[in-house]
Amino acid sequence: MWYLAHKRDLPWRTTAIPYYIWLSEIILQQTRVEQGLPYYQAFVTEYPTVENLANASEEQVLKLWQGLGYYSRARNLHATAKYVSNELNGVFPISYKELIKLKGIGDYTASAIASICFNEATAVVDGNVYRALARYFGIFTPINTSLGIKEFKNLAQQLIDVDNPGNHNQALMEFGARQCKPQNPNCDICIFNDSCIALQQKNISILPVKLKKTKVKNIYFNYIVLISKNKKTFLQKRIGKGIWQNLYEFPLIETEKDFNISELNSLHIFQDISRKFEIKSLVLYNELPILHKLSHRNIYTRFWIAETSINNDEAISISQIESYPVPKLIGNFITTFFKLKEYGQKQKK
């Protein structure tokens, strides 16, 4: 009853088509609904079917995903779309057991699709569910341990409504998101306030328990923004398994601390870049490093504007720069420096 009265009007709740449910669940992994909704709408508009998504290039998919973060989700999304379209004739598997075999689909996503689309009684356990169950039942087992994952999954499975698993799962997730919120939940109006163990024992603020495993490391990025008189610049694709794989960026020099211009000039990697692109001058764009936080990294970034005589096949026109998929950090810089004509203002100084 709570869910029917309080659920948000969201587009993926008006359908049981596996493609749309899968798309919404992948986008909403580690993403708030308010942030993910415009991306969902953009993907549905651009790629209304799994075949449409499969036929897109990875670069197009990454560009549409730009700014959402955790880009491995986009790469896995594209890979799975191609597999479903080409190997399964565009038809998603109908069971949890088969869904979980698809790339980028774990227990939570497989459970969501199986229950919502195919009425399979398999429980979803996301952050909202962990929080609601931990508080209501007073469970102190850390949710990011193998023991905790198993305990909460088993509990959620015991509680599921086998006759209506899809609505049950969505109701529990919505309850955690809107009522049993991480900070300052309004327990006075909660329908479970007379039986919630955490509320009775005043443990709301400390549940659920999550162990701190990841040590956050500080790293320092120095991007060399090459600008030629004929309004060309240079972007390179990130390769390998690191962050922002297959996204584009300016030539990068990574250091272990903040570098000033003389320290940067002394590096062999900068000297190689300078020779390759015939850099004439170098000016620091931002005095204060821009902090970009990831789950395991604090990236402190400086952009260095380099005047160059670059004019070869590797150069791209500044007018085309926004067509490339880039990390949000670089996208923000491009918008400020190029689109708002700050580049022109700097050139006049």
Image (cartoon, rainbow, N blue to C red):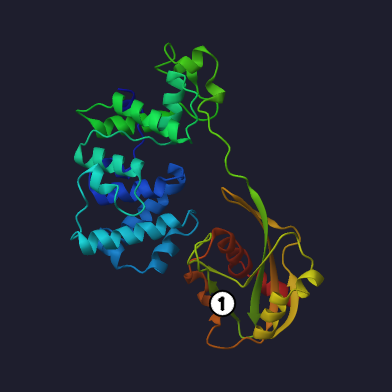
- The quadrant in which residue 103 appears is bottom left
- Is residue 15 in view? no
Give the quadrant of the N terminus: top left
The residue positioned 46% from the left and 15% from the top of the image is 197
The residue positioned 19% from the left and 59% from the top of the image is 88
Which residue appears farthest toward the front when viewing the image?
Answer: 147
Nearest the eye: 57 or 46: 57
> Is 338 displayed left or right of 121 in the figure?
right
Q: Position of residue 201 (x, y in %)?
A: 53, 13
Q: Amino acid at mark 1?
A: Ile
- The quadrant in which residue 45 appears is bottom left
Which residue does the numbered mark 1 point to in the structure image? 318
Which residue appears farthest toward the right when viewing the image?
Answer: 262
Nearest the eye: 153 or 263: 153
Give the quadrant of the C terminus: bottom right
Compared to residue 249, the image places residue 10 above or below, namely above
Q: Position of residue 191 (x, y in %)?
A: 39, 17
- Is residue 8 in view? yes
Q: Position of residue 330 (x, y in %)?
A: 58, 63
Label 1 crowd (10 A; few <14 / some 14-19 / many >=20)? some
Compared to residue 163, the image places residue 66 above or below, namely below
> Is 348 displayed left or right of 136 in the figure?
right
The residue positioned 54% from the left and 80% from the top of the image is 317
> Is 89 displayed left or right of 59 in the figure?
left
Q: Secondary structure at mark 1?
A: helix
The residue positioned 50% from the left and 30% from the top of the image is 142
